[in-house]
Amino acid sequence: MDKIDILLATYNGQEFLREQIDSILNQSYQDFNLIISDDSSEDETYKILKEYEKKDSRIRLFRQEKNLGLIQNFEFLLKQVTSDYFMFSDQDDIWKENKIEKSINKLKQEKAALVYTDLEIVDKNLEIIYPSYWKYKNIYKKIKKYNNFEALYLNNFVTGCTILAKSNYIKDIVPLPKTSKFMLHDYWTALVIASKDKIAYLDEPTIKYRQHKNNRVGSSRRSDKIEKFKELRDLFIRVKIEHFQIFEENISKINSKEIVKYTKPALEYFKALEKETNIYLKSWTLFFKLYKYEDFSYKMQNFIILNLPIFSRLAFKLKKLIRRKD
């Protein structure tokens, strides 16, 4: 069997932590280390972790003296990896009992460097909300059709807690980018590996992806809660500016000359959009190159919001008005 290092970052996760650890320890595939880094939790999290550490020799436990934050905590964990493969884990989900087994089999079958899977969205009591995260997020067709670095370049579709990947790429992944709150460890990991090697997907849920009020990262979209059009458009633009800034700062880590050549023009394009509030049609051909792998409705919705805000502003107001009446 191949050894796997499972990386679990914890912070104030006492409510669901035992269920998650039990689901990992009871996997059908047993040849793994569970490496845990607690980010200075203030509740009973660390006490729970110490209990498990005493029970199972596969657990390696670390405690951070100062709160690092999610990204730096995962970076610390990546630096502890000694096995040939690694996986990410959240603190509040439930792994289905054959998650590891099916993931490693799929990776080898596809001769890939990274494999990721679908998720089952559940509430805090594990009742199913949506049977497929991919279909809920409307990314299923994109994954089935493309599943490559070029499609990942603009928008992420790889969820970190489903990843199993080869550890030899960690040297390219770390240090993780820290200048954007929108580029998390899982997206960066998938981007770097996909630019250098093959990624594969397992077309079934292997995780019960729990949604609750204390989620650090969840299935809900920030844009759904915005009430003003300007705030929505500003968010879209800010996400992309920080996105392409990350690429600019880490250009040497991405092995795709054909795609990376768009990075600087894309950054300049989104910065120009930031200053325009009515109509901006310069570089519209670049927009369609960047959004090439998105479906038609998503592509056109974004084009109107970004490039023709004078028209989409009214549509946004009408949509909010209709929603309130409903």
Image (cartoon, grey):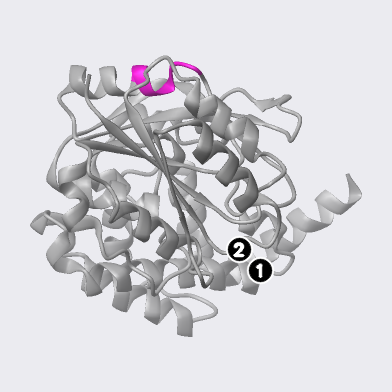
Task: Indicate the quadrant where residue 108 lies.
Answer: top left
For disc 1, the marked residue is: 229
CB under 8 Å between discs 2 and 1: yes
Q: Residue at x 24, y 39 (%)?
A: 148
Seen in the picture, residue 98 relative to 219 is either above or below; the reply is above
Residue 132 placement (x, y as % from top left): 55, 26
Asked whether 272 or 318 is in front, the reply is 272
Residue lying furthest bottom:
275
Q: Residue at x 40, y 56 (%)?
A: 74
Question: In the visual, does 177 lie left or right of 50?
Answer: left
Asked whether 196 or 107 is in front, the reply is 107
Q: Main secondary structure of the magenta part?
A: helix
Can residue 137 be spotted in the picture? no
- Magenta region: which residues? 97-102
For disc 2, the marked residue is: 312
Q: Does label 2 or label 1 sit earlier along the sequence?
A: 1
Question: In the visual, does 218 lie left or right of 194?
Answer: right
Residue 175 placement (x, y as % from top left): 27, 65
Of tags 2 and 1, which is closer to the observer? Answer: 1
Q: Under tag 1, what secondary structure?
A: helix
